[in-house]
Amino acid sequence: MNLTRRDFTRLGALGLAARFAHGLNAQTTAPKTRYAVIGLGRIASHFLPAAGSTTNSQITGLVSGHRDKADRIAAQYNVPAGSIYNYENFDEIAKNPNIDAVYVALPNSMHAEYTIRAAKAGKHVLCEKPMSTTVAEAKAMIAACKAANVKLMIAYRCHYEPTNLRAVKLIRDGALGQVQAIESSFGFNIKAGEWRINKKLAGGGPLYDVGIYSLNACRYLTGEEPAQIAAFASTIDHDGRFDEVEENVSWTMKFPSGIVASCATTYGANMAGYYKVYGSKGWLQVDQAFVYEGLRLRAEYQGTKLDELNPARDPSHFVAEAEHFSHCVQNGLEPQSPGEEGLRDMGYITEIYKSAGIKI
Ligand code: NDP
């Protein structure tokens, strides 16, 4: 998205300017923040090439339970054998001067442990969402990073993604008038055998994994924190996949201004991630809002009609996210999605589960 300096000043007033800072402030002379990626699975396969293609980030370490896989990836990114760790010897990373930060790309229940161990090793932490499986873990992660004086950012990539930011800006600029209501959903039909349906590893079901995108979006779209939450959960398919976590969650949030948001998530059906925002002077909708490419913003307000397909391709979200965190690390700045942002979502997830009668 091309933002003018006037736009940038207005965003500054909204506290959003730093999210665009890299566009105006090319970091060509900045040093590189050197990352070790922990957990070489699907999301890591997006982050690895993204970090490598930034001007301010570099992959210099790997942490994996599978040495053969780590060796293959190390060869691709020129990571020396001495900078490949496993989960047992991970703490030795403290002695590695060529690693500044870690990217935690592990199952949810492992985020707290590896964030805390990395902080104790003196490394900055970029941790995947959901931040943790409980509020207590999230607080411990924040405390550990503060005590070690290292940065903690939760990888809410939509906070750094232009179409989502465009939607926020239109709303803040008053294009839609007074926002009244939001609808959002995100879900997919999960396969048996995934760690995502193992409560011990995942913490919970689709709300932790994909529903969190709708929850977080309602917060950044409104710029408010939910005042009241009501939720329902259900499991329809008794085929063994949902013995430990629920299949469906649907919840409503009322914000202090009176805006009401209705959200749904599932592991039982394909539910393309989207949101629709209804205001007194128009509406906007972002389809594919939470996936890696193909985001489409449509809107009608005050005589204006928009239909914008974002041409950016994967892994552009991860490039923006890595650039932002590296920029913060190098300049001693607080990330736009710090641990406290993840903690807030953990609190709302807990409330949603409580309202739905699910024990975390
Ligand atoms: P994967 O299962 O694809 O990868 C997780 C990796 O963690 C594994 O490949 C493995 O790496 C390591 N691991 C260590 N212990 C275990 C274990 N007991 N079971 C399974 N894996 C283990 O998961 P994803 O990459 O899809 O998800 C990882 C995290 O990223 C999750 O928290 C998820 O919510 C988040 N995520 C974020 C997305 C985003 O867009 N921001 C999208 C998708 C996921 P190794 O073999 O190297 O040890």
Image: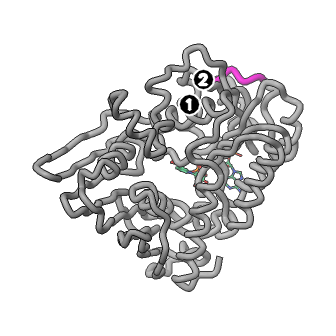
| Picture coordinates of residue 118, whole percent (x, y) | 79, 43
State the separation of the CA atoms marked 1 and 2. 6 Å
Q: Quadrant of residue 327?
A: top right
Q: Would you call the spot at circle 2 few (<14 residues within 10 Å), some (14-19), or many (20 or more)?
A: many
Q: Is residue 43 magenta?
A: no
Work out whether 145 lies above or below 333: below
Identity of the residue drawn at 31% across and 52% down:
171
Q: Helix or strand or loop: what does disc 2 sit on?
A: loop
Tell whether circle 2 marks a residue whose Cβ is less than 8 angstroms from ligand 1.
no
Asked if residue 7 lies left or right of residue 112, the reply is left
Q: Is residue 152 at least partly visible in the picture?
A: yes
Please state the extent of the stretch shown in magenta in the rendering: 76-80
Circles 1 and 2: CB atoms closer than 8 Å: yes
Which numbered disc, 1 or 2, marks the residue that appears first in the sequence?
2
Asked if residue 93 lies left or right of residue 303, the reply is right
Q: Is residue 193 at least partly visible in the picture?
A: no
Asked if residue 335 lies left or right of residue 310, the reply is right
Q: Which mark is residue 56?
A: 2
Q: Main secondary structure of the magenta part?
A: loop
For the residue pair 87 and 122, the one nearer the viewer reads as 122
Residue named by callout 1: 323
| Picture coordinates of residue 25, whole percent (x, y) | 49, 22
> Amino acid type of disc 1?
Glu
Q: Would you call the spot at circle 1 few (<14 residues within 10 Å), some (14-19), or many (20 or more)?
A: many
| Picture coordinates of residue 120, whole percent (x, y) | 85, 45
Q: Looking at the image, which residue sits at the far left?
A: 303
Q: Is residue 77 magenta?
A: yes
Query: Dividing the image into 4 quarters, which one contains the C terminus?
Result: bottom right
> Amino acid type of disc 2?
Asn
For the residue pair 102 and 255, the one nearer the viewer reads as 255
| Picture coordinates of residue 238, whole percent (x, y) | 49, 81
